[in-house]
Image: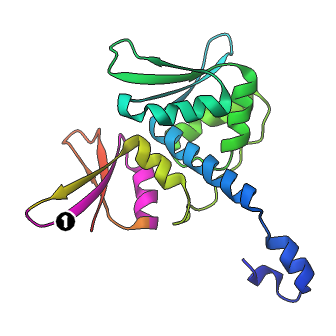
Amino acid sequence: EYSMLVGSSETVRMFSTIMTSHEKSDLKIRQWIAGVIDGDGYFGISKLGHVSLEVVMELRDEACLYKLKHRYGGSVKATSHAKALRFRLHHKAGILAVINDLNGLLYNPVRIQQFQKVCALYNVTYLTPSPLEYISAYMSGLFDSDGSINLNITSQQVFITISQKSPELLDIIASVYGGKVYSCNAKNTAYKWTVCR
């Protein structure tokens, strides 16, 4: 990051690269949220033009949903079959806060398409994400929503896996973290990224 500032004074270089610990922490939080929403979220727009964000997760992931509720408002309730929880946000102030937090941090093509429609509705310029970095907290959010860890007792190998309905997001993950992306069925309606350690 310093190479772009070669020839500038030490003072300019210092002020151009400083990010406070609070800013770094908030960026990590926003990256994590982006990962969660890319994995289990959905942006919807009603016929009347009302925007909503929903995130559905298993009961054991309740803490993740309450972190979203604490930051944006909204509600966390059991789904109709009571085997999962749904975070739902539909008030404008909360949606605008989500847009501000996540703009430029989403990588799932399906979620980006939904997000772009919401941005257009609110006259917000959509920001294309920068290439995903290894140290991004995005991966932890995506893993919290769609990841699993399995141990093969015989080989003593650990398999880290993330599942999606299409391969595009998983291909991005593989390009950064290694591993392989493969189809889980003959109809190509489910995919997994797996890395073995």
Query: Relative to the observer, which residue lies in front, 165 or 40?
Result: 40
Q: Which residues are magenta?
A: 154-176
Quadrant where the N terminus is found in the figure: bottom right
Q: In percent of the image, x 46 and y 58: which residue is there?
A: 172
Q: Position of residue 32 (x, y in %)?
A: 55, 48
Q: Position of residue 25 (x, y in %)?
A: 67, 55
Q: Amino acid at mark 1?
A: Gln
Q: Position of residue 42 (x, y in %)?
A: 52, 29
* Extreme residue in the left direction: 154
Judging by the rendered image, the residue that carries numbered circle 1 is 157
Residue 168 lies in the magenta-colored region = yes
**Left/right of residue 33 with respect to residue 172 in the rendered view:** right
**Left/right of residue 39 with respect to residue 154 in the rendered view:** right
The number of callouts visible is: 1
Instruction: Give the crowd class for mark 1: few <14, some 14-19, many >=20 residues within 10 Å.
Output: few
* The quadrant where residue 52 appears: top right
Quadrant where the C terminus is found in the figure: bottom left
Residue 16 lies in the magenta-colored region = no
On screen, 172 above or below 40?
Answer: below
On screen, 2 above or below 65?
Answer: below
Q: In percent of the image, x 80 and y 32: which residue is there?
A: 123
Q: In percent of the image, x 84 and y 72: which residue is there?
A: 16
* The quadrant where residue 78 appears: top left
**Left/right of residue 42 with respect to residue 149 in the rendered view:** right
* Extreme residue in the bottom direction: 7
Q: Position of residue 140 (x, y in %)?
A: 47, 52
On screen, 69 above or below 145?
Answer: above
The colour scheme is rainbow
Element assignment for label 1: strand
